[in-house]
Amino acid sequence: MINITEAAQAHFVKLLEQQPEGTHIRVFVINPGTPQAECGVSYCPPDSVEADDTELEFSGFNAMIDSKSAPFLDDANIDFVTDQLGSQLTLKAPNAKMRKVEDDAPLKERVEYKIQSEVNPQLAGHGGFITLMELTEDGIAVIQFGGGCNGCSMVDVTLKDGIEKQLLEAFAGELTAVKDITEHQAGEHSYF
């Protein structure tokens, strides 16, 4: 479910030494399964453990995960990274915004998952995102751009050389094209 690197485990052990005995960590997702999902780690004293928590054992501590967050923390990774700017704890949870779907799930669910877990994080650097509006019977994914992508002068390149290429490769033989239905309006919100 969650991978915690050795460096992160050592960091947690050091932090927990300063807490009351029996304190562990809690890994959670606020607003799981939504575009506003945020992941976090906090201390979890013994009186905060819930009956339906998932408990993962690590060297020197346990990680508690509440039942609502658990499905959205599949493939999550916690690391403690040190570079020239200092040290920081990183938590990457690719499934926080949308629950991971099975390989045999309906095509629409798999495409939406790919958009939320891979495409939208790439577009977020420019303040944009896409939404799957429809999946036609002939395999066309109809999308709509939002945020900074709406009205951007590079939207056609992003669609053809980025999004369409990525989705057609991922769903070869199932998707035939990606079509944009956005009524693009230039404005201050667009990234140029």
Image (cartoon, rainbow, N blue to C red):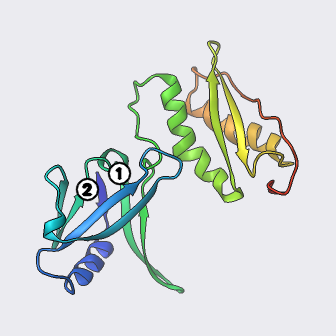
- When asked about the image quadrant of residue 105, the answer is top left
**Mark 2 is on which residue type?**
Ile
| Residue 66 point in image, percent of width and height | 26, 53
In what quadrant of the picture does the C terminus appear?
Answer: bottom right
From the top left corner, tell me how far across and down residue 141 is, in percent: 65, 26
How far apart, in angstroms, are the residues tagged by discs 2 and 1? 9 Å
* Dots 2, 1 in contact, CB < 8 A: yes
Q: Which mark is residue 86?
A: none
Residue for point 21% across, 87% down: 18
The answer to which of marks 2 and 1 sits earlier in the sequence is 2
Task: Look at the picture and state if 137 lies above or below 176.
Answer: above
Q: Where does the image place residue 122, in percent across and percent down from the top left? A: 63, 52
- Picture quarter containing residue 8? bottom left
Check the image and report above or below for 108 versus 82: above
Q: Amino acid at mark 1?
A: Leu
Count all numbered tags in the image, as a single digit: 2
Mark 2 falls on what kind of element?
A: strand
Label 1, on which residue? 73
Residue sitting nearer the eye, 174 or 15: 15
Left or right for 140, reference 40 = right
Residue at 41% in and 48% down: 32
- Above or below 162: residue 107: above
Q: Secondary structure at mark 1?
A: helix
Residue shown at 25%/69% (left/top)?
A: 25
Q: Which residue is mark 2?
A: 65
Residue at the farthest top position: 137
Residue 76 left/right relative to 135: left
| Mark nearer the viewer, 2 or 1 | 2
How packed mark 1 is, by other alpha carbons closer than 10 Å (few <14, some 14-19, many 20 or more), is many
